[in-house]
Image (cartoon, rainbow, N blue to C red):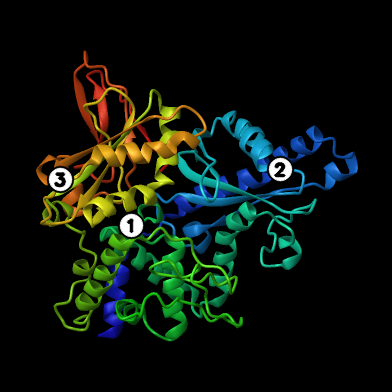
Amino acid sequence: MEEERSVSLLQFMGNERLVPSAEEEEKRRNIVQKLRQVIVLSWIKKVAWQRGIPKRQIAAASATILPYGSYGLGVHGPESDIDALCVGPYFATMADDFFIVLQNMLKSRPEVSEIHSVKDAKVPLMRFKFDGVSVDLPYAQLKVLNIPQNVDVLNPYFMRNIDDTSWKSLSGVRANKCILQLVPDLKNFQSMLRCVKLWAKRRGVYGNLFGYMGGVHLAILAAYICQKHPNASLNALITNFFHTFACWPWPTPVMLHDGMSRTAANATETRSFIPIQLPCSPYEYCHSNITRSTFYRIRTEFLRGLTMTRDVLKPDFDWGSVFEPFPYSKKYARFVKIYLSAPNLDDLGDWVGWVKSRFRCLLTMLEEVQGFCDPYPTEYVDMEKTEPNVVFYWALQPGKNNFVDVDLVEQEFMNISNGYQGSPGKMELSIVLASQLPKNPQFDNGSWKNTRACWKILDKEKSKIPVYSQHFPHYTVGYAAANDDAEYLCTGG
């Protein structure tokens, strides 16, 4: 029965299209190869010449691209983004050479579209689409001239004297490399992590910017279970995952066994509700935006998973029940509608990226006035508006009908936008009821997975025909004019 359950789980994963096709894999490999061997290499030669580097050093100068995140771990899906770190030499700066020279080179490429800079985030990056695939590209500057194509980011030689921002940018690549070295069975780990990510997305507890667990958090938790149970089946790994973390004595940190001596963490490092130590350093922890509300939600979902998998060996067990989408519109009666807009699509992309990087601040503000807030980690669009926009719906505490002064929260949050580089867009907060949520099945059956927020400048003089997602036939992604000329764009979020 144990083996049958593992087989049925693999079949479930196949039905959910969690594994990309050979063609989709090839497309991503070509994107990374083109970024690494054509664009970034040309960029660094150009920067070296502009900086007046001697010709002999220009010939030796190099930069590279290092995939990480779900793609680097081999657990990406058909529509997953590519997380890739650009690593450059000592003379290539982030402010001028990365965000100006390289960005201009990318903008000139026919394969690149929807490019935006997120400069004020903890890990600054460029976000764009390459041949239709979303790419997140941060930057790290090493104090060397020549960057090997597959530079060893765990080698102290390359890590010496680097700046704090580069260190943070490198943490994802370093963590990936350590995890792949430490798991006893890579195939089992990858299958388990795909399942865990699907569970977190379906149950609404995935997304670091929204105060939930990100990819690196789940990867380390999955690797921890694989280390503890090196010979377990996939079925046993999933059940042990829920049992372990439903009963975990938080805030005790989760640490992988990597042969390094571990020291007791100080109060600053463990201020996270769910501290998870990075495997590449005994002193670093995964960056976390988890708050009181999201910690409660995560723990509740761990406990639910434990309850649901207790009967895993019974004949009538169904994996679908474990991955059943969280019923937002049935669980909550009131939501905060967060409406973000800007005059054009380029400004909107920059504005939304900046606001999302500060969502934790907004979440804690709402918790102060409401006590509980569940940020639904999906983007929408208000098609009734003519300006480009993105909308989020965050649930408020069930059964609490106290007045929420969202205008005050909005004013306080917008006060911090004084540091925004550029002209800030608009943000409007309002309270809506569950009955006022978008009229599509996303809130009830989880068909939101792998969707992006879409927007369009509407011409109200034209009749509009809804355009539906090719993967989720009931989900409207935009509108077409009566002549079938569809005009809608999807964010690279």
Which residue is tagged 2? 41
Q: Position of residue 108 (x, y in %)?
A: 59, 28
Can you identify the residue that label 3 sits on? 403
Q: Quadrant of the N terminus?
A: bottom left
Q: Residues within 10 Å of mark 1 (few under 14, many from 20)?
A: few
**Type of residue at label 3?**
Phe
Residue 469 appears in the figure: no
When the figure is inspected, residue 219 is found, relative to residue 104, above or below; the finding is below
Nearer-N-terminus badge (3/2)? 2
- In the displayed structure, does residue 322 sit left or right of residue 229? left
Residue at 50% x, 50% y: name it.
Answer: 82
Task: Tell me the CA gap for discs 3 and 1.
Answer: 44 Å
Q: Nearer the viewer, mark 2 or mark 1?
A: 2
What element does badge 3 sit on? Answer: loop
- Which one is nearer the viewer's eye here, 59 or 483? 59
Question: Which residue corresponds to mark 1?
Answer: 17
Please name whichever residue, 444 or 276, is drawn nearer the observer in this view of the structure.
276
Which callout, 3 or 1, points at the residue further toward the start of the chain?
Answer: 1
Asked if residue 272 can be seen in this view, the reply is: yes
Specify whether 416 is left or right of 3: right
| Quadrant assignment for the C terminus | top left
Q: Position of residue 409 (x, y in %)?
A: 29, 42
Distance (Cα) linking label 2 and label 1: 35 Å
Q: Amino acid at mark 1?
A: Arg
Q: Are marks 3 and 1 in contact (CB under 8 Å)?
A: no
Of the pair 351 and 113, the residue shown nearer to us: 351
Q: Is residue 151 above or below residue 263?
A: above
* Dot placed on the residue nearer the N-terminal end, 2 or 1: 1
